[in-house]
Amino acid sequence: MSSATPRGPIETTPAYYPGCSLDGLGKAYEISCQQVLDRLGLSLDRIVDYNCCGATEVKNLSEDVSVALPARNLALARTMGRQQVVAACNGCVYSLTRANDAVADPATRERINATLERGGAPAYDGAASVQHVLEFVYRRAGPERVRAAVRRPLEGLTIAPYYGCLYTRPKRYTGVGKTPGTDDPEHPHFLDELLAACGARVLTDFSAKTICCGGGHALSDLDVSVAFSASILNEAKRAGADLVATICPLGQINIENHLDRIRAEYGDEVVRPVAYFTQLMSLAFGASLREARLADNFSRPDLFLRSRGFS
């Protein structure tokens, strides 16, 4: 069986798993992520020849495939000599951490590694740790370093921080609230603090910050999916938010993809521009609206921000 023993010592630069979304509809997220990392002097090493993590759907068809897909990516990170893996998608973090939980059982790990071997992939030793890029930025840089990097504060903007449901759940997989240095599982605050360090007024008590966006229901029950997305925007309106900041491409795309139906059912006044948190941080660090790719978003936060004096 092929081995996943790292070549040389573990490096301090984590491996980066982009996943499908950041190479597709979430490209603006990846580009703005890189801008933020560059400005803060942080680096990640991209995993080459990665595959889809299986998201949350594959487990309904095959439990072993749902573990083998993310395990292959973790094995590739280990062959790079990396123990830490960073992903920017909540669904990807879920899949990767779920695979770690599964292969902690020796019998499962042996079975999954046999599957990987048949596909020509390295075996996975179960030793990689996974974190969201939000956690990575918060823990490696923190609010003070972010504040020092700001060139154009997000003053005058009131932002609703939307973490989504899979950032802190389930704790058994994510380790949030259990592993030292992780976010609060019930009242996450990493995003709140980073955006506040950029000069924005952040709605820290935003009651919809960890509810589901309905993305998992988008194909099976569109009405339910729209209702979930609308509840986030309705709460943002009630709380007085100018924009909603997201950390997950599924949450971002699911909310934005339903805007026409939300307008029709709840009124145009409910709709708020939605942007990735890295786009807003990049803007605060001095990038233009174009450079931060804010025109890529269906909700066109660039038009709103231009009306507030940003260019």
Image (tube, helix red, strand yellow):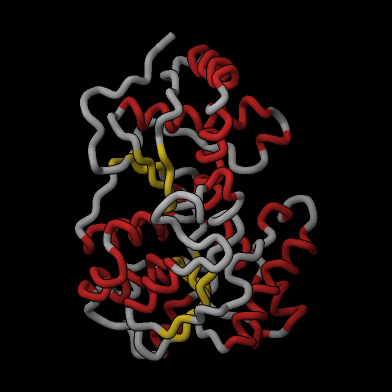
For the point 38% across and 78% down, the residue is 196
Q: Is residue 295 left or right of residue 53?
A: left
Q: Is residue 120 left or right of residue 220?
A: left
Quadrant in the rendering for residue 42: bottom left
Q: Is residue 232 above or below residue 304?
A: above
For the point 53% across and 13% down, the residue is 114
Q: Is residue 191 above or below residue 267?
A: above
For the point 61% across and 27% down, the residue is 65
Quadrant in the rendering for residue 7: top left
Quadrant in the rendering for residue 191: bottom left
For the point 77% across and 59% down, the residue is 222
Foreground pick, 57 / 86: 86
Residue 211 percent coordinates (x, y) = 65, 65
Q: Is residue 22 left or right of residue 115?
A: left
Foreground pick, 310 / 200: 200
Q: Is residue 286 visible?
A: no
Residue 137 percent coordinates (x, y) = 33, 59
Residue 274 percent coordinates (x, y) = 52, 72
Residue 35 percent coordinates (x, y) = 28, 61
Give the quadrant of the C terminus: bottom left
Foreground pick, 21 / 39: 39
Q: Is residue 146 visible?
A: yes
Q: Is residue 129 above or below residue 248?
A: above
